[in-house]
Image (cartoon, rainbow, N blue to C red):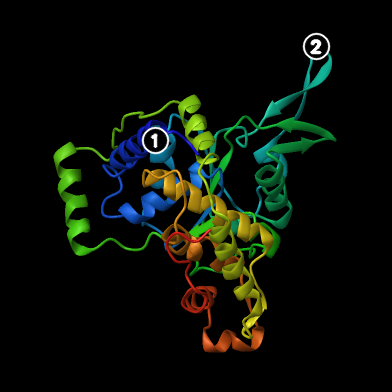
Amino acid sequence: MTEPPVVDKARQKCHEILSEVGKAIVGKDEVLESVLIVLLANGHVLIEDVPGVAKTLTAEMFARVLGLSFNRIQFVPDLLPGDITGSMVYNSRLEDFEFRKGPMFTNLLLADEINRGTPKTQSALLEAMQERQVTVDGRNFKLEPPFLVMATQNPLEFEGTYPLPEAEVDRFMARLRIGYPSSKAEREILSRRQSRKRDEVELLRIVAREEFLSLQGTVETVYVSPDIQDYIVRIVQATRDDHRVHAGSSPRGTLALFKLARARALMRGRDYVIPEDVKSLAMAALAHRIVIRPELWVERVRGEDIVDDVLDRVPTPGPGED
């Protein structure tokens, strides 16, 4: 287990990061915390929501505050794999081909409207998400850590889109929704915009890239007791046993929940995981990995409903159990 001063320092730094991003994203503290938890756990996040709720702004602000390089790719049907990975270009001076990097070579990548990209382009992104590398003309090019993807998609518009295959959805550590702001928060958005007299929001860099990598490393030292590990496994297995499910969460979902719980514990100033860490992130980690039986689609059964029921059924470990 980590020394308490290290945990306290990490907790304070996370608080500063969220406070700074909160200057631009108003009234969404829980969502911002969830995004930071995913990034600390070195995972990719899928943000599924309607247009105009600050999905893109959230990615930009986190990149700025975390001191990470940032690129945005607008996925469209005519986007080719080489447009995002880069390509081999002939250099007449050297009389040879050299690799010209695409926008994929960054620390935080925003894949905007990812479901508008063709399967071939999505496949190129999938390799980068899983292997942290791209392959061009048979050559592998490593991506500098951290490589994190924040992808967005609009759940209401289906014309001209290519639904993400289950294998790609499974690569996202979490799926989140931002949602509309409350009336009070929306009023605060207007007030802040009037006060600063411009659209752009200036945020400070709270950490540098190296310090963020150190925070990710600290997450790896958070202790998860055998009892909590069993609790995570029972939750995931219960998603597979539900009669309404065609396919439950994969083992990758088990690992995702494990990693997210550790990151949340660190942000709460603990060097150990408690059941509440697991419960609070089960929805984000597992719901998008569950495939409902086709005959139940008409009943509007969702992965979220399965996770809710599972959390009610699976006994929570008591205090002090190991």
Give the labeled residue for mark 2.
Answer: 94
Q: As displayed, is residue 22 above or below residue 98?
A: below
Please tell me which residue is depicted at 57% across the width and 33% down the height of the picture. Answer: 106
Please tell me which residue is depicted at 30% across the width and 48% down the height of the picture. Answer: 25
Percent across and percent down for residue 273 are: 47, 52
> Is residue 229 found left or right of 131 in the rendered image?
left
Q: CA distance from mark 2 to mark 1?
A: 55 Å
- Looking at the rendered structure, which numbered label has been put on residue 4? 1
> Is residue 231 found left or right of 121 in the rendered image?
left
Percent across and percent down for residue 35 are: 44, 49
Q: As displayed, is residue 79 above or below residue 177?
A: above
Percent across and percent down for residue 51 are: 41, 59
Q: Secondary structure at mark 1?
A: helix
Closer to the camera in the image, 264 or 190: 264
Disc 2 versus disc 1: nearer the observer: 1
Residue 305 visible: yes
Closer to the camera in the image, 147 or 151: 147
Q: As displayed, is residue 194 above or below residue 294?
A: above
